[in-house]
Amino acid sequence: MRKRKEILEALFRQHYRQMYRLATLLLHDDAESKDIVHDVFAQLLASPAIELHEETAAAFLLTSVRNRCLNVIRGRKIQERVQRLYLLDLDTTVIPPDLFREELNALSEGVSLLAPPVCREVVELHFRDGLTFREIALRLGVSETTVYKHLRHALSQLREHLKRKE
Amino acid sequence: MNKTNLLFQMMEQPQAYTDQQWQEILADEECRELYNLMSKTQSAFDSQKEIDDETIDAEWQRLTATPHRGLLRVAAMFIGVLLLSGIAFAAVHLVRSHWNTAESLGGDLASPTQETRISDSLQQTLPADTTVTIQPIVFDNVTLDSILPQIASHYGYAVDFRSRQSKTLRLFLTWNPQDSIQKVTEKLNLFEQIHITLYEKTIIVE
């Protein structure tokens, strides 16, 4: 039993970042993502019958995270899914092994190139700092419609940037 | 209002719109593409977050320091089975003793009202110590985003943090799982920086 706990601890430390990353990409929530990884290992600790092999452990753990995330998403109504910015059609989307890495890197690069600066500011305030459009409007001293205009312009630039990177 | 502005406005307050309205706006190809791009942009920001070794240590401690939910479930089921067995035994015992008494008195055993009386008397004769007391859980210097998912899960609720700042608030809280969720919410709202509401099986933190 003790040996199994040590094996699981080693796997936990080895795969935590990748598992957390997958969960957070799907759920966009730090606490929920940690809970997903926590639950996967809690089940493993409580179920000695589940055997893990080194060569297949990573795939097993990531699939467990993915399935748990999809269960969370399926249990939520459309309004909640939108509020959390879940990707649409996740149930049927094939999640690539590299977890959209190239596309996300391209998007991060695209954000850094947004112009004029107010477009980047709106994107960062909303997606990085979690401010609502209303809060951004108040912070910038403009109307919400103006915030929408900057956001639309920013997203248009990001779309073009992704096309160029394809 | 053009459709992308409408989409942004709807995203600001998703709960204010019906399923039908959401299906309509997301059926629009341009809006759907825009929404998915926003989702991926959020993922791009999320993917920049680094998890340090201290966090992994803390998460492992959290995992191994608390009883696993699976074990708790098994324990709960075990207690449930014991309780039901006890009730069943008491019921059989009461029915037998009642019928024996009735037989010795020459009464009518087939009367359905007798069953009702037996059932009623069963409740009264259960010993007081049959009830299972659940100990309060103490959260000592724990962040709200660790506390609420546990509480929500107990009541079958989801948690919606609309304010990111509130997630990191650290609290000392004694939670009695036997309290109603409304009572727990009232207790949490006593904290000055917390404003919590309940809406359709969701705990909303603003």
Image: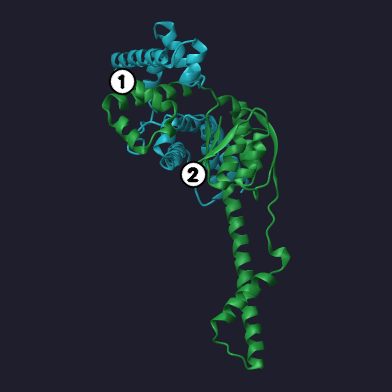
Chain colours: A cyan, B green
| Residue A118 picture location, percent across and down | 44, 8
Mark 2 sits on what residue?
A52
Say whether residue B81 is left or right of residue A91.
Answer: right
Camera-side residue: A103 or A86? A86
User: Can residue B141 be seen?
Assistant: no
Say whether residue A14 is left or right of residue B24.
Answer: right
Camera-side residue: B88 or B117? B117
Above or below, comparing residue B100 to residue B183 in the picture: below
| Residue B68 picture location, percent across and down | 60, 47
Occupied quadrant, residue A116: top left
Rate crowding at label 2 as few (under 14), some (14 to 19) or many (20 or more) other CA atoms within 10 Å.
some
The numbered disc on residue B2 is 1
| Amino acid of disc 2 | Leu
Occupied quadrant, residue B57: top right
Above or below, comparing residue B81 to residue A162 in the picture: below
Q: Residue at x 49, y 10 (%)?
A: A141
The answer for which chain carries disc 1 is B
Say whether residue B24 is left or right of residue B129.
Answer: left
| Quadrant location, the C terminus of chain B | top right
| Residue B51 picture location, percent across and down | 55, 25
Occupied quadrant, residue A81: top left
Q: Residue at x 58, y 59 (%)?
A: B77
The answer for which chain carries disc 2 is A
Single out the residue that lies furthest toward the top.
Answer: A116
| Amino acid of disc 1 | Asn
Image depth: mark 2 or mark 1 in front: 1
Rate crowding at label 1 as few (under 14), some (14 to 19) or many (20 or more) other CA atoms within 10 Å.
few
| Quadrant location, the N terminus of chain B | top left
| Residue B81 picture location, percent across and down | 59, 64
User: Can residue B156 be seen?
Assistant: yes
Say whether residue B116 is left or right of residue A136.
Answer: right
**Helix, strand or loop at mark 2:** loop
